[in-house]
Amino acid sequence: MKINSSLLSIACFIFTLLLFNNTNAQDTDARIYKIIDSVSADRIESDIRKLAGFGTRNTFSDTVSTTRGIGAARRWIKSEFDKTSQDCNNCLNVFYQKDLVTPEDGNRVPKEAWVVNVVAIQKGTKYPNRYIIMSGDIDSRASDTMDFETDAPGANDNASGMAGTIEAARVLSKYKFENSIIYVGLSGEEQGLFGGKGLAQYAKNNNWEIIGILNNDMIGNIEGVDGIIDNRSFRIFSEPVPPTETEQERNARRYYGGEVDGISRQLARYIHGTVETYMPEMNPMMIYRLDRFGRGGHHRSFNDLGYAGIRIMEAHENYNRQHQDIRTENGIEYGDVIEGVNFDYAAKLTAVNAINLASLAWAPPAPSKVAIGGIVEPSTKLRWEKVSGEIAGYKIYWRDTTSPVWQHSRFVGDVSEFMLEGIVIDNFLFGVVAVGKNGHESLVSFPSSTFR
């Protein structure tokens, strides 16, 4: 009996150990680590050098030359997307999307010109009309934004973000996804965010369902003008609530909360969580602001139409290398040149984008019509409309009202409502996600109504 008892104890221990290991193994997706390892700093360096080598990419610069100006740059970007598509059996639909701008459109428009975006779409297998977008800016500028002839290599602002977008397409084109991914070079950023506005309106006109846009603007500088050198931290800018919300929704927040729980903020939290899981060496900083103080980026145009959108960029800027004519004054070097770019850092932030594009593209749609109840009760009730198709189920998240990130979660299975016993509705904020059978989660859906 003693021998049998000992053997039984050992067997139970081994079974428990295996179960524990298998459970933990399902917490992450090995493909995500492979994606991180596939991002090449060398390829990104080559692409940044190529883009900076066009001399200037000002929106109003030469469009005819094959070696200089915005025209040559966007044709080269399209050729790179085309090459990637050829390597993946034509898995990308590559095209130009353009809009005409005139001096009447803004005080930074010196003459009439076409603002041309370069778009590459990798169609999803299950939800082809749902899109997650990664963008970089094509254009650059000198000290005077109206000067479209002076050299403006724009190595960091924003050849880095554009090169990262091209590289993400190369890496992710090797995989199949349930949702569609868009890789895009947007133009006209320095003249008034024209490219973002044009593509956002194009998406609306074509009834695209936008999961969100990850706008990358300056992802290569690690040496800030503040003297800090940091190759691990980066910022995620996001606005708290959509500008398109109704007066009724604004009034409801006074009673139910949600001041920092709009769709863009949920996208920022998603990125923060994915990075902490798969790239713990990085330090994602969620900045509770649409963009840098008084400044803007292409994601804003998507936000303006009610789409989720965030900006990913370096943590410490060097203003001597932004929007500056190339020169030396009082021993200080000015200009956005190659020497100011750290290619390994740009590769890290490219990987940040790639793993979040993949995670969201592999995830089911977020649950809709999430409602919450539990007023004057010792428990919280949640109810939602289930998504179409087979999934693993749903997970409820909750956090302290002062916490920037979700702290607690519970997988509740393939149900459409659940009660959290003993969790008082007054003390927390709540959300619900759909979980795919592959383990990838949708964005959090914050409750939009109440019930008893």
Image (cartoon, rainbow, N blue to C red):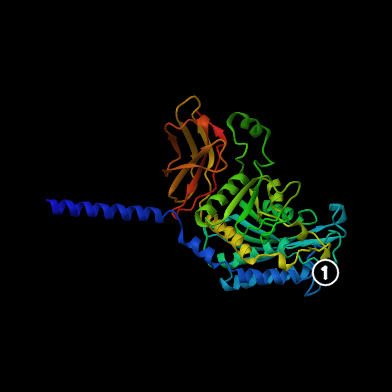
Give 424 or 248, whichever is nearer the viewer: 424
Amino acid type, callout 1? Asp
Residue 60 visible? The answer is: no
Instruction: Name the side, left or right, on which 379 lies relative to 223.
Output: left
Identify the image quadrant of residue 360. Answer: bottom right
Which residue is labeled 1 in the image? 62
Between 147 and 343, the one nearer to me in the picture: 343
Task: Answer above or below: position of 88 versus 59.
Answer: below
Image position, residue 59 (x, y; %): 80, 62
Viewer-side residue, 441 vs 32:
32
**Camera sees residue 249:** yes
Q: Is residue 385 left or right of residue 1?
A: right
Residue in the picture at 48% in, 30% down: 424
Residue drawn at (43%, 34%), measured in percent from left and top? 419
**Residue occupying the point 86% across, 62% down:** 147
Left or right of 10 on screen, residue 77: right
Q: Position of residue 207 (x, y in %)?
A: 64, 51
Residue 136 in the image, given as x and y percentages of width and height: 68, 60
How many labels were placed on the picture?
1
* 442 lies left or right of 314: left
